[in-house]
Amino acid sequence: MTFAPHVIDPELDLELVRDIPVTPEAVFSAWTDPESLTQWFTPHPYTTPVCEIDLRPGGAFRTVMNDPDGQQIADSTGCYLHIVPNELLVWTSALTTDFRPQADAMPFTGILEFRPNGSGGCIYRAIAVHQDSAGRAQHEEMGFHQGWGIVVDQLVAHLQAI
C-alpha cells in the first residue's frame, strides 16, 4: 500500500467496509470510467444519466442523478484531491475544478480505499469525512450506510456481469 489509511473520527466520519469478490483494479476502473459508473452509481431504481470525470488532482467529478420518473434530483460536482491508481480515490464536494471553492448544501470529503484481500478480491473501504458532527448526522440520516451499501452491491454485480 502506497498511502496511509484514513483514521476514522467517529464524531465526524462515516465508514463502509466490505470484502468484495472483485479486484482493486476492476473497482478502480469502475469508479474512474464514466460509462461504467453510470451503470451502478445510484441505488436502483434511481439512475445516473450523466457522469463526467477529469481524473487528476484538481480535476472535476460530476454526476447527475434522476428519480425513477426521470426527474433530475441532483447535479453534484466535486474535485479530486488525491489519486493512487488501483488503491485510492479522494475527492471533495467543497471544491470544484482546479481546487476552486464552491457552495454546497453538505460538504464532505470522500475517500475510497481498495486493498487486495488475498483471495482475488478486495477490501473496499468508503469513508465520508465531514466538517462537523451535524454534517455527519445529516449524511447518516440521509441513508449513507444503506445507500452506499446498495451501491457497492450494484458495483460488484456490474463488474461480475462484464
Image (cartoon, rainbow, N blue to C red):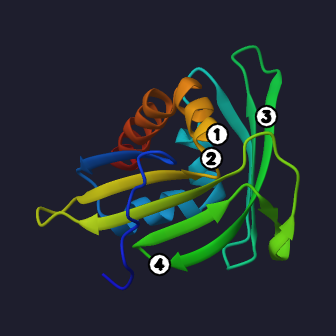
Task: Say the numbered circle drawn on residue 135.
Answer: 1
Q: Amino acid at mark 4?
A: Pro
Q: Are marks 4 and 2 in contact (CB under 8 Å)?
A: no
Q: Are marks 2 and 1 in contact (CB under 8 Å)?
A: yes
Question: Dot 3 corresponds to which residue?
Answer: 74
User: What residue is at 72 percent from the left and 49 percent from the top?
Assistant: 107
User: What residue is at 56 percent from the left and 32 percent from the top?
Assistant: 137
- Point out the frontmost of discs 4 and 1: 1
Could you classify mark 2 by the number of other residues whose Cα lies within 10 Å: few (under 14), some (14-19), or many (20 or more)?
few
Question: Dot 2 corresponds to which residue?
Answer: 132
How far apart are the alpha carbons under marks 2 and 3? 23 Å
- Quadrant of the image occupied by residue 27: bottom left
Could you classify mark 4 by the number of other residues whose Cα lies within 10 Å: few (under 14), some (14-19), or many (20 or more)?
few
Measured along the vertical axis of the image, is residue 136 above or below residue 127?
A: above
Q: Amino acid at mark 1?
A: Gly
Question: Dot 4 corresponds to which residue?
Answer: 85
Front residue (pair 99, 161): 99
Q: Name which of mark 3 and mark 1 comes first in the sequence.
A: 3
Front residue (pair 49, 79): 79
Front residue (pair 16, 48): 16
